[in-house]
Image: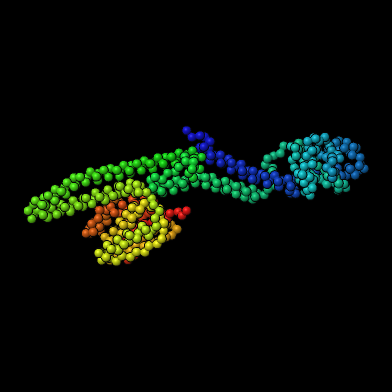
Amino acid sequence: MISPIRSFNVKVLGWFWLTLLVSVLSIAIPAVLIQQFSDENHLRGKERELLNVMTRHVDEMITDSDGDFRRLGRMMKKSDRRMPFEWFVIDKELDIVLSSAPIRKSLRERFDNPRFWYFLQSEHLRDINVEWTRLLGPGGLPSHPDLKLILWRPERPKPMEIFRAMPWWSIVGIFLIVTSVMSYLLVRSIAQPLNRLGSAFNAVGRGQLSHKVEVGNPASQDKRFAANAQFARLFEQFNDMTARIAALIQNQKRQSADISHELRTPLTRLQMTLALVRKKSHDENILPLLERAERESELLNLHIQRLSDLTTLEAHAIQQGRQLLTSEALLSELCEDAAFEARGMNIAWQHALCSATLNVYEAAFVTAIENVVRNAFKYARSSVSLRCENDNNGFKVIICDDGPGVAPEELQRLTKAFYRTDSARNSDTGGLGLGLAITAEAMRLNEGDITFALEKTGGLCVTLKFPVAQQG
């Protein structure tokens, strides 16, 4: 049972609401700051007209009263009973010198706040909300520059009003930037385990059936994917699938090895029988039949031997283990043997080696190169070449011949077991169709790749690419 907190659906939904919250806060915080410290004029229409009228009226009455604020207060209360706002007059020291109604102590204490001070210093008519009280002003009295008129009334702040100070393009821009960044982080968090799963499939596709995504191993880098329950379960299913495939392939190899082993005993008896028949028979007419039976027996024996090599290559390689070896040590003797055989076959042989350090199964490595070279000798008309290349992608061994080549559509099938091209079937070169299959298996063990290409002048080029050992 997947924990709801670790559920992928819950995380995506939570990320959506988090993105929305961050977007609103990213717009609201600058809007509040702009609203508090901006000198923009927010008063329009009737409120602006009311404040201007009250400012002129209060200024005239203060002038007429000769500074008697008590008498002036009683006069203002009588004349302003139906006003939608209360009012007060404040001096430079932020002391209230005249008011139409008592003011709460908590509101008075907020007059020392920088926000209220910026409000008083504004050159434009504005409104702010302090202690759930809306204030309009400051209305400067023309005849009394030290005094300012403020209109007020209890009013809860409206959440949407904080966005009035920001232009629409800045709101849209901030929203797009925040949602883009949050969406990128979400996509990356989803893409990382998917990319890891993709690389795991590629590894298995190259034959690395032992490859696993170890989300349960604290020492593995894949541990970070264990936080998401769905992906962790997906990786477990992937590991289980590769284990089943590996077991199935291993079982097939074991059966093939058992069959090869069981066939050797009757084959040996058949060869002994043919030898006895040849020794005791004096009929010359039967000798061609015996020779044909012996050739077929030898061919069958070669089939069994190559099939055994294919099925036991991995077991022998694992038993031997990987070794750090240089390319010269791996290929020098092979190239000398190839040169010797080429002279006997009247074929021109060329090779060019370069230096590289490889971490490989030695026997499998040599088998892969040797099978390709022998295959090139088999079909070459006059020349075979081997050259090495070192680049950022790894160490490459490229083997080319000037033979007839193969049809382009057959290139992808050359490594299939028992597959032979039409030209090979119709020629006297022989072959069982297992040499390149053994090469492909050896490349898989060494985590390498094999590719085929046709030469423009005719012939086939085989590229064997191996990973270079990490230094240090």
Q: Is residue 413 visible?
A: no
Residue at 33% x, 63% y is 385
Q: Is 397 positioned to the left or the right of 52 in the image? A: left
Q: Is 106 positioned to the left or the right of 179 in the image? A: right
The location of residue 290, given as percent across then percent down, is 13, 53
Colour pattern of the rendering: rainbow
The location of residue 335, given as percent across then percent down, is 32, 61
User: Foreground residue, 448 or 183?
Assistant: 448
Q: Is 318 positioned to the left or the right of 15 in the image? A: left
Residue at the top extreme of this rendering: 1
The location of residue 379, given as percent across then percent down, is 27, 61
User: Foreground residue, 364 or 181?
Assistant: 364
Residue at 59% x, 41% y is 18
Q: Is 282 positioned to the left or the right of 419 in the image? A: left
Q: Is residue 309 above or below residue 454?
A: above
User: Foreground residue, 39 or 246?
Assistant: 246
Residue 24: quarter of image:
top right
The location of residue 11, given as percent across then percent down, is 53, 39
User: Foreground residue, 21 or 171?
Assistant: 21
Residue at 33% x, 50% y is 441
